Image (cartoon, rainbow, N blue to C red):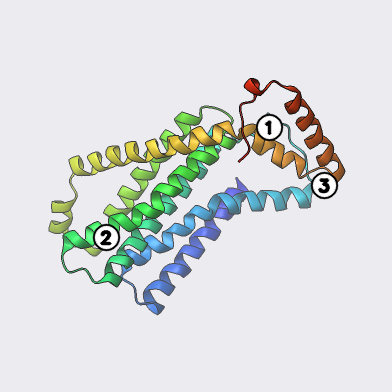
Amino acid sequence: MKSLGAAIVSALLAVAVAYYGLVELAGLEKATAAHLASAVMAAIPYLRELFEKAFLARHHSRTPVVISIGDFGISPRRMVLYGTLIVVGAMNLGSGVGALSAWYIGVSSDIQWLRVAIIVASLIQFPATVGVGYWVGRRCASHGVTVIFLVTFLARVVTALFDAWLLVRMAAPLDVYGRWSFPSVFSNIIGGTLVFFLFSLLGYWRGRRQRVAAYLFYLLQTVSEDTRKVIVNLAFEEARARPPQARRASPP
């Protein structure tokens, strides 16, 4: 918990610094700056793992502990937390970059602005969602499909609430009431969850098939070069001994 708290505090400080710089120095609108700065929250999983490794190295041993394939998987609870933070960061980054792109192009109407913002944001958000699904498939210990559903749902809830909070602070109350009603927010959350969940499934399916390969790659990094060659040669000899119709893979 200490490592998580330290990661959150570090990320919040980075968000505050980034927001100040984007508003005061770069001269961006507050809403766009808030979306871009909040993307830093996606770094919390990396910061937490970094702090945990530093803590273990200081208080236990400097020799890395080799984990088994059973311990290679990350718990579903932690995966939900990490995945949600990453997807929220990607969604806000996409929204901020989309708004900047529409402003840079110089679109005249609100409809054109919205189209450009959505297209640019999708180019960031969808690949990030597929990547999170791929990572969950490779590393989640169990209940991977449930994890990616919770990740996409919670990410949509957080981003919807974040957008509503921005509108309340930066728009007139009547404008907020007209643009944000409960049915519209609910439909946006459900619709967005389904779309991002489907994209995550594509990554999850691919990552699940490569889970053993990911562990083998990790394991090979912990042994000497000679041992790596021996393992590869053993696998090659066994693969060559199998009949061609039993081989499921082909060279890339």
Pick the front one: 22 or 8 = 22
Q: Residue furthest front?
A: 244
Quadrant in which the C terminus appears: top right
Q: Position of residue 56 (x, y in %)?
A: 74, 47
Residue count near mark 1 (Cα–Cα under 10 Å), binned few <14, some 14–19, many ≥20: few
Which of the marked residues, 3 or 1, is nearer the chain's N terminus? 3
Above or below, 72 relative to 10: above
Quadrant in which the N terminus appears: top right
Secondary structure type for disc 1 = loop
Q: Mark 2 vs mark 3: give the one in front.
A: 2
Dot 2 amino acid type: Val
* Horizontal side, residue 248 vs residue 22: left or right: right
Dot 1 amino acid type: Asp
The residue beneath circle 1 is 71
Q: Which mark is residue 63?
A: 3
Pick the front one: 15 or 204 = 204
Above or below, 110 relative to 76: below
The residue beneath circle 2 is 116
The residue shown at (31%, 49%) is 161
Above or below, 246 relative to 53: above
